[in-house]
Image (spheres, rainbow, N blue to C red):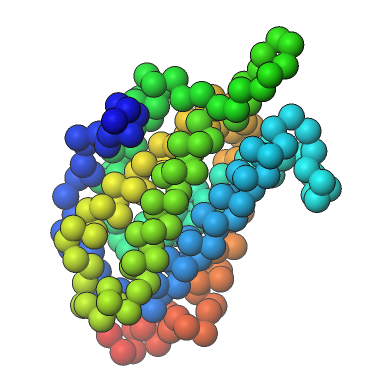
């Protein structure tokens, strides 16, 4: 097995007191699945058309990918806040994985051009990590998991590790492909506000005042 395929022996800091799966938490998980799926779809377009515009004519793929990364960062932030996960508990895993990705020198799409060119460094790794996150989130939203008052410890730990892995993979793609960090940060802030508004106004989630009355 390739060393790149092996997971790092770096776990996130223990956090055993994850809250029960409230409607709001489940809604945020569904939102995160949707946003991650959108990034995977766009990544497929970037792989198919690595050097030029996509036939859908919706704008440069580099800009769209940067904005999709920002959207996923925002969706993760809202999810983390909703489950009251201390951000610090994810940092060690995220940094360790990012340093590993740098060490491995994750490549991208090698084109048989003259001279040869490589595009979208690390995008394949991001697709892998995002797929694993969607798999866990789907389990999180399943009736088998929802029937429990809290997440099973092994699912909780794996979920937190995958969040750190996805964050690191996004960091690497942004860094290795010189994507516009300032634009991504601005988009992330805008998307955070949009997602928080969506979650707070959803009919599936009680209002803050109702939560206070019924608690």
Q: How many marks?
A: 0
Q: Quadrant of residue 146?
A: bottom left
| Residue 45 higher or lower than 140, as above or below | above
**Which residue is painted at 33% across and 34% down in the image?**
5
Residue 99 visible? The answer is: yes
* Observer-nearest of 140 and 51: 51
* Observer-nearest of 176 and 85: 176
Residue 67: x, y in percent? 64, 45
* Observer-nearest of 181 and 66: 66
| Residue 112 higher or lower than 152, as above or below | above
Left or right: 48 in relation to 141: right
**Which residue is painted at 43% across and 84% down in the image?**
206
Left or right: 163 in relation to 78: left
**Which residue is painted at 33% across and 89% down in the image?**
213
| Residue 195 higher or lower than 87, as above or below | below
Q: Quadrant of the C terminus?
A: bottom left
Residue 44: x, y in percent? 62, 45
**Which residue is painted at 19% across and 35% down in the image?**
9
Residue 122: x, y in percent? 50, 31
Q: Quadrant of residue 184?
A: top right
Left or right: 59 in relation to 69: right
Left or right: 60 in relation to 153: right
Q: Quadrant of the N terminus?
A: top left
Residue 63 visible? The answer is: no
Residue 171: x, y in percent? 47, 34
């Amino acid at each position: 097995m390739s060393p790149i395929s092996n997971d790092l022996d770096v776990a996130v800091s223990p956090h055993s007191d994850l809250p029960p799966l409230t409607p709001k938490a489940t809604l945020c998980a569904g939102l995160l699945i949707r946003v991650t799926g959108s990034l995977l779809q766009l990544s497929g377009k970037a792989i198919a058309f690595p050097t030029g515009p996509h036939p859908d004519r919706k704008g440069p793929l580099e800009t769209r990918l940067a904005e999709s990364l920002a959207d996923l960062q925002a969706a993760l932030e809202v999810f983390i806040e909703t489950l009251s996960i201390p951000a610090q508990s994810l940092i060690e895993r995220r940094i360790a994985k990012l340093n590993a990705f740098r060490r491995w020198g994750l490549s991208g799409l090698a084109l048989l051009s003259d001279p040869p060119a490589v595009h979208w460094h690390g995008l394949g790794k991001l697709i892998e990590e995002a797929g694993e996150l969607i798999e866990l989130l789907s389990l999180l939203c399943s009736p088998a998991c929802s029937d429990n008052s809290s997440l099973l410890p092994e699912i909780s730990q794996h979920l937190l590790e995958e969040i750190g892995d996805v964050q690191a993979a996004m960091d690497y793609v942004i860094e290795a492909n010189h994507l516009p960090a300032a634009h991504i940060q601005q988009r992330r802030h805008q998307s955070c506000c949009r997602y928080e508004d969506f979650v707070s106004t959803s009919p599936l989630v009680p209002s803050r005042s109702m939560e206070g009355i019924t608690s």
